[in-house]
Image (tube, helix red, strand yellow):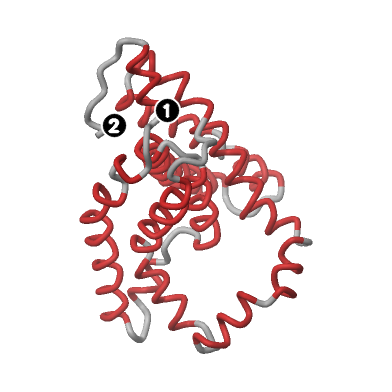
Amino acid sequence: MGFRLEGIFPAALLPLLLTMILFLGPLMQLSMDCPCDLTDGLKVVLAPRSWARCLTDMRWLRNQVIAPLTEELVFRACMLPMLAPCTGLGPAVFTCPLFFGVAHFHHIIEQLRFRQSSVGNIFLSAAFQFSYTAVFGAYTAFLFIRTGHLIGPVLCHSFCNYMGFPAVCAALEHPQRWPLLAGYALGVGLFLLLLQPLTDPKLYGSLPLCVLLERTGASETLLCS
């Protein structure tokens, strides 16, 4: 289920670094739009009072701690080991995210109840959310298999919850759109270039899910090496 000490430090740092590289454009956008400079921003982030305020905010706890931990525990740590012996790792990586995407359909009920938009727009929004949560679920399933740890997917999930979906339309209308779009393109390019090296199983020790499949007689070499 991804709870082990072997290789835990690279498993915590490298997937998060990889995800931050993918979000290079949005991070640049956030920095450009932030009224404070880097030094002041770091002081706020590192201040104990800021963390105390966050830890008493139920919405922050839900989005940054509870949801990432419980969703990754259920849809990656529990579901993948059950599906993989039956379907193989490849199909399991793309099957689990479908359940993960459907689990977010409760937002439709909330939006319909509070009449936040027209019915058509609500369902279009739900379809869009299902699509990108399914893609994200496949990515964290890939991380879980390649690192053999749960901590990487949880930290990446928390980071993505904080960042939200990249505001590409806002970037296109930004006063500094050309450097910003270059950052978006560079982030995606570096992410694709570093995806395999930074998730190399050799960095993380033995992979429990791959060992499980070997014991059941399944042959999975692509994701396990």
- The foreground one among 194 and 121 is 194
Query: On the image, numbered disc 1 is attached to which residue?
Result: 208
The percent coordinates of residue 20 (x first, y second) are 40, 62
Which is more toward the observer, 45 or 215? 215
**Residue type at numbered disc 1:** Pro
Q: Which mark is residue 78?
A: none
Is 155 left, or right, of 177 in this rendering? right
For disc 2, the neighbor class at 10 Å (few under 14, some 14 to 19, many from 20) is some
- What's the residue type where badge 2 is placed? Cys
Q: Which element carries disc 1, helix, strand or loop? A: helix
Residue in view at x 39 percent, y 76 percent = 28
Please tell me which of labels 1 and 2 falls first in the chain: 1
Q: Residue at x 35, y 17 (%)?
A: 87
Query: Exactly how many numbered labels are in the figure?
Result: 2
Name the disc covering residue 224, or none.
2
**Is residue 170 or residue 11 the one in the foreground?**
11
The vertical placement of 131 against 61, above or below, is above
Task: Quarter of the image for the C terminus: give it.
Answer: top left
